[in-house]
Structure formats: C-alpha cells, structure tokens
Amino acid sequence: MREIVHVQGGQCGNQIGAKFWEVISDEHGIAPTGTYKGDSDLQLERISVFYNEATGGRYVPRAVLMDLEPGTMDSVRSGPFGQLFRPDNFVFGQTGAGNNWAKGHYTEGAELIDSVLDVVRKEAEGCDCLQGFQVTHSLGGGTGSGMGTLLISKVREEYP
C-alpha cells in the first residue's frame, strides 16, 4: 500500500490538521477512540494510506504534530479526536516564535527540528511503500511559516 505521512505545524497547521483528521476519520468510520465503527467495507479500503493499525484493531493516524509552544497542542489533545494520536508524536517547545518567521526558521525552530525529524523518520520507517508527505502549516506568522519551511527543506534533503 502507498502510505502518506501527515505533518502539521504551528497554530494554523494544527487547527487545519485537527479538522482534517475529524473529517477523514468520519469518512473511514473511525471513532474518536480509534476503533472502527463504520457500516461499509468500502470505508476500510485504503485506510492504511493515512492510518496504522495498532493492537486491538485500533487505527492510529500516521501524523506528526509540531509547534513551538504547547497551547495549540493542548487544544488538539483535549479536542474530540485528541486521543486518536500517538502521544509521542506531539513535538513542541515552550517559547513560541512570536509571529516571527526568522525565529521559526533559524533559532527556536532550528532547536526543535531534529526532534521533529526523528518522529517523521520513525513514521516513514513504519511504511511499506512511502508515497510522500502532506504538510499543513501557515504561510504567515512564525512557527507554521518559518519552521514549516525549515521542515520541508530538511524532508526534501532526507527523502529526495
């Protein structure tokens, strides 16, 4: 199967990503607990594109969530589908980027990027046939734009 690793970064990327997982989980019949509650075999077709099947028939998103401050992560974690994600796939700092692209790209983001890439690598290595990466991030602000572009350039180096 051809798998996709989803990476969401910054406030905007994590909010869009949280909604993405709500919608795609609903389409595949996946409950907020990760169990299949659907009513059609069609819902399980190609489910491995975005999900890993864990023990007990639980489906876990192949997602990495990153931010330079914990606030949005806490919101996603406490949201309706927050328990769906692997807890160790949340990677966040404490300082934030203060709406500053350079902080997200060169200073604060540069300190956290290796931790993010480790989680991305772990998810990629768990794939049978990695198709690619899907990234949700903003183009303005600090974390989504600055760290988002840093992540994309590092991923392009590592996965040409």
Image (tube, rainbow, N blue to C red):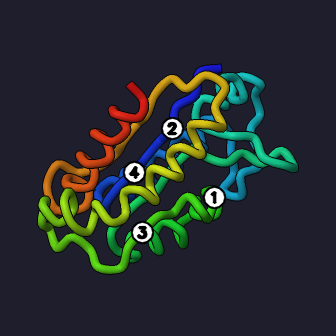
The reply to whether dot 3 and dot 2 touch (C-beta < 8 Å) is: no
Question: CA separation, marks 4 and 3?
Answer: 12 Å
Q: Position of residue 95 (x, y in %)?
A: 29, 79
The residue that mark 2 highlights is: 5
Q: Secondary structure at mark 4?
A: strand
Q: Residue at x 42, y 69 (%)?
A: 92
Q: Residue at x 23, y 46 (%)?
A: 149
- Residue in front for this viewpoint, 108 or 98: 108
Q: Secondary structure at mark 1?
A: loop
The residue that mark 3 highlights is: 92
Q: Earlier in the sequence, mark 1 or mark 2?
A: 2
Residue sitting at the far bottom = 94
Within 10 Å of disc 3 (Cα), the crowding (few <14, some 14-19, many 20+) is many
Q: Earlier in the sequence, mark 3 or mark 1?
A: 1
- Residue in front for this viewpoint, 26 or 1: 1
Q: Secondary structure at mark 3?
A: strand
- Residue in front for this viewpoint, 114 or 67: 114
Question: CA separation, marks 3 and 2?
Answer: 18 Å
Residue sitting at the far right = 56
Within 10 Å of disc 4 (Cα), the crowding (few <14, some 14-19, many 20+) is many
Within 10 Å of disc 1 (Cα), the crowding (few <14, some 14-19, many 20+) is some
Q: Residue at x 53, y 52 (%)?
A: 119
- Give, as a three-letter code, the residue at label 4: Gln
Question: CA separation, marks 1 and 2?
Answer: 13 Å
Residue 86 - label: 1
- Give, as a three-letter code, the residue at label 3: Phe
